Amino acid sequence: MDGNLIQALPGPHNLDNYEKVYKNFDFASVEKEFSWFETGRINIAYEALDRNVTEKGLADKTALYYTNGPRVEEYTFGQLKKLSDKFANVLKKFGVKKGDRVGMFLPRSPELYISFLGILKIGAIVVPLFEAFMEEALKDRLGDCEAVAVVTSPDLKSRLPLQHLPALKHVFVVDNERGGNVSATEIDWHQEMQAAPDTEAMVWVDRETPMLVMYASGADGKAKGVIHVHNGMVGHYITGKWVHDLQPDDVYWCTADPGWITGIVYGFLTPWMFGLPIVIKGGRFKAEDWCETLEKYGVTVWYSAPTAFRMIISGGDELLEKYDLSKLRHILSVGEPLTPEVMEWSMAKLGIPIYDTWWMSETGMNMICNYRCLPIKLGSIGKPFPGITAAIVDDDGNELPPNKIGNLALKAGWPSMLRGIWGSEEKYKEYFKFQPWFISGDSAYRDEDGYFFFQGRVDGVINTAGERVGPWEVENKLREHPAVKDAGVAGKPDALRGEIVKAYIVLNEGYEWNPDLSEELRNYVKKGLAAHAAPREFEVVPGIPKTKEGANDRKALKGWALGLK
Ligand code: WTA
């Protein structure tokens, strides 16, 4: 280690000279990697799954290792192809077609991945729903995009507010025997799968056909339905090659939930484009179980988040000493700042660096990253991926010189970029108010060597344990409670989770603050929206700071959360 610099790893790597490639690269050169370059037949499900069977001779190779307590299973590419064809045929039978939105509301399980691929195969659009979502979060998302079907489980289905979702015609329930009554809209997933043929079900689409509506929280208003198209695969593939450095013998584990963008793009689509087995672990995070999983499957490339690393670090040396993690070639990190202590831990205890990757739901692929062939500056998110121009701009869209903090911006036009916001041209345009820049909502600076340093969100969006929480949604929920007159929510720095959700509350007359009320409000948000959005800290205040327009003043609230009140 040289001061704050971690030297580049000696090759061979898929990307061996960042600067040279950066100068000459054009995304169009990646297109020849796909079978559609020759055939003209496009579908991301073909490139991620079927092609392994039909062209690459990998039908019998393991594609998915699943482990969740007593449930331990393995699926080959051949099996997954057939099963997803079956589900695609089930969808066709019920009249679900190209362009229809289908919610995916399941815990991590093989059925989730099978269904996901089945939906993509028929050209329909997946709407991922994190399993912690409760009624209101589901109503907002499924209602906004008028989903016609949802795939869910017995435990989760009761949260679906069917009376508020008039467009929703079919509820496919996995494992329904545990759930009892099948209502008029409910369909038994297993029964249909048994009866369905596994004949080819692929529907060919255009590169610009939508495949995903990923709801992402903004600072104000409800979550926005970020639209991604099949062409995104160009960015997935080439970042898999150059950032994740995927090699034919790798075993890949991305711990992100497929309810979020990372768990989709890098959870399975990208590693499968390389014919690699992925590991999926169901259930909750437990440091010990995670180390055991890394060892058991001989994971070579691990994509996770600083909160998880910190939880493993807190298990101490005793934890690490129990497991053989020597198969790990490298680790990648996403979602929240990778602090130098975490990197130092990895270097000291595992002997390998952690490559930070910066991106967001809207960008659809890794954008600013560290690479094996490039020295790492501790605390830096790295340099823009080849083909990507990143800059720091001021609040009028003018580029700033090195070492000045400003808005992290990206030049629009990369293959995986969002193509729209469902139902709102206006919200889509907000990202592009300074042409040609896409404004990320993050603040950062760039040093004189071209390394970027993440500083935080500029807009009040909260990032707790790598999960994105919209303050407006939480405030809105809190205001529905009879004790709450007004509420303001902001991210408060936290050693373990990066940030926690902190709520400032103005009480209605006749209410007094006490620990029970704090617990009640926390549960109220948990039950209405989602557990990860529930405030961990409350403070009663006489009033919430407002802007001229009367909205909550995000900057002032952030100041409070930073202790500047
Ligand atoms: C944050 C997740 C620090 C950032 C892929 C961004 C990060 C938001 C990093 C997007 C990183 C992402 N270091 N912060 N390496 N990567 N973020 O949409 O604030 O769930 O805007 O996508 O996470 O979150 P999202």
Image: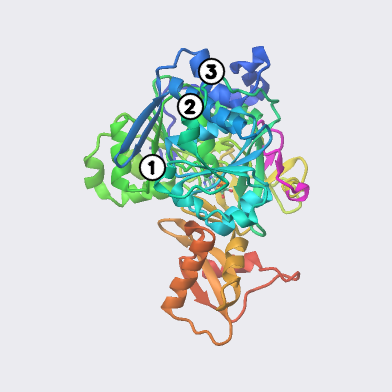
Q: Disc 1 and disc 2: Cα gap in Å?
A: 20 Å
In the rendered image, residue 402, in percent from the top left (x then y), is placed at 63, 45
In the rendered image, residue 282, in percent from the top left (x then y), is placed at 38, 42
Q: Please tell me how crowded label 3 is: few (under 14), some (14-19), or many (20+) other residues with Cα within 10 Å.
A: many
The residue stretch that appears in magenta: 408-427
In which quadrant will I find the N terminus? top left
Residue 71 located left or right of residue 547 = left
Judged by depth in the image, the label closer to the viewer, 1 or 2, is 2
- Name the residue: 57% across, 47% down: 184
Q: Disc 1 and disc 3: Cα gap in Å?
A: 27 Å
**Up-down: is 395 above or below 85?**
below
- Name the residue: 50% across, 75% down: 539
Q: Out of 93 and 526, give the one closest to the viewer.
A: 93
Mark 2 highlights which residue?
Answer: 83
Whether 109 is among the magenta residues is: no
Which callout, 3 or 2, points at the residue further toward the start of the chain?
Answer: 3
Helix, strand or loop status at disc 1: loop
Whether label 3 touches label 2, CB < 8 Å: no
**Up-down: is 466 above or below 555?**
above
> Residue type at mark 2?
Leu
